[in-house]
Amino acid sequence: MPKALIEPHCHPRRPTLDVVKALAERFDTTFTATAIRFVDLTEESCAVVWSENGRVKWSIPGRNFYPTVSFGRTLSGLSHAGDAFRGKPLPRDPQLVPGHTWVDRDGDLWEQSTYFRTLGAVLTLLWRES
């Protein structure tokens, strides 16, 4: 995804997985690759996280997101991503969660997750309001 083509679309009023989905459809790219590229190019304080079996498999922070989400971290009972592994439905819209749900820092984070049933994995977009 060339920066010059996608970057103008990476500055939404509010970062969400709906924005990522629209970009993936527009540029005919995978959802996960688009989420990674979005986090890389947006000025928002965002991170994308991939979880399997209730643990963080990998995370990619954007340039303004810190501290990072630790690999291997067990998902908190406060995270919606963790809910997916417990068989609970995920909320459609982003939800505010305590920052310590994902990182070792106070302050709230927005979380929006989607469950890939066939992969047994959850992709999460996190962001902190400026």
Image: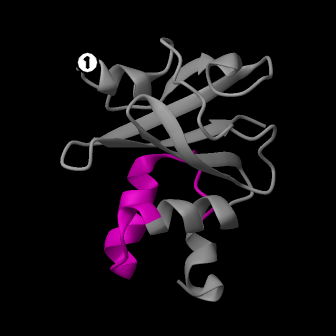
53 or 21: nearer the viewer: 53
- Residue at image point 81% right, 37% down: 67
42 or 13: nearer the viewer: 42
Residue 21 in magenta?
yes
The residue pinned by badge 1 equals 88
In terms of image quadrants, where is residue 25?
bottom left
* Magenta-highlighted residues: 10-32
Q: Position of residue 94 (x, y in %)?
A: 46, 31
Q: Quadrant of the C terminus?
A: top right
Q: Position of residue 105 (x, y in %)?
A: 80, 22
59 or 8: nearer the viewer: 59
**SS class of the residue under badge 1?**
loop
- Residue at image point 71% right, 34% down: 129
In terms of image quadrants, where is residue 51?
top left
**On the picture, is 86 further left or further right than 80?**
left
Q: Position of residue 88 (x, y in %)?
A: 25, 18
